[in-house]
Image (cartoon, rainbow, N blue to C red):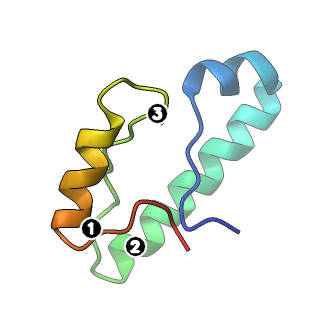
């Protein structure tokens, strides 16, 4: 399994039923509540699609700061 899960909201709306969208929201809310209870911040990420023309520049910056290009 990948380290991160990223879902495009348009895909969620287009491919999940309303009930499935509610369940997904409940799961996300539970994770956020648990993190807050543990004294941890809610995750807030920047996501860049690999097909962007500037992806090489971004991955170079990430490598420079000790982050690998792909999740292990």
Q: Earlier in the sequence, mark 2 or mark 3?
A: 2
Residue occupied by mark 1: 41
Residue occupied by mark 2: 35
Residue 72: percent from left, percent from top: 56, 74
Q: Quadrant of residue 1?
A: bottom right
Residue occupied by mark 3: 49
Query: Left or right: 35 with respect to 62?
Result: right
Q: Earlier in the sequence, mark 1 or mark 2?
A: 2
Q: Which mark is residue 22?
A: none
Q: Secondary structure at mark 3?
A: loop
Residue 70: percent from left, percent from top: 49, 62
Q: Secondary structure at mark 2?
A: helix
- Closer-to-camera residue (9/35): 9
Q: Residue at x 36, y 23 (%)?
A: 53
Residue 68: percent from left, percent from top: 37, 68
Quote the CA–CA distance across marks 2 and 3: 26 Å
Q: Residue at x 61, y 43 (%)?
A: 25
Quote the CA–CA distance across marks 1 and 2: 6 Å
Residue 38: percent from left, percent from top: 36, 83
- Closer-to-camera residue (5/30): 5
Q: Determine whether 17 is above or below 65 in the image.
A: above
- Closer-to-camera residue (63/25): 63
Q: Nearer the viewer, mark 1 or mark 3?
A: 3
């Amino acid at each position: 399994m990948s380290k991160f899960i990223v879902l495009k909201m348009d895909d969620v709306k287009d491919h999940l039923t309303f009930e499935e969208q509610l369940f997904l929201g409940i799961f996300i809310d539970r994770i956020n509540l648990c993190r807050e209870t543990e004294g941890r911040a809610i995750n807030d990420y920047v996501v860049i699609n690999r097909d962007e023309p500037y992806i090489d520049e971004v991955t170079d910056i990430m490598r420079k700061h000790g982050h690998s290009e792909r999740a292990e």
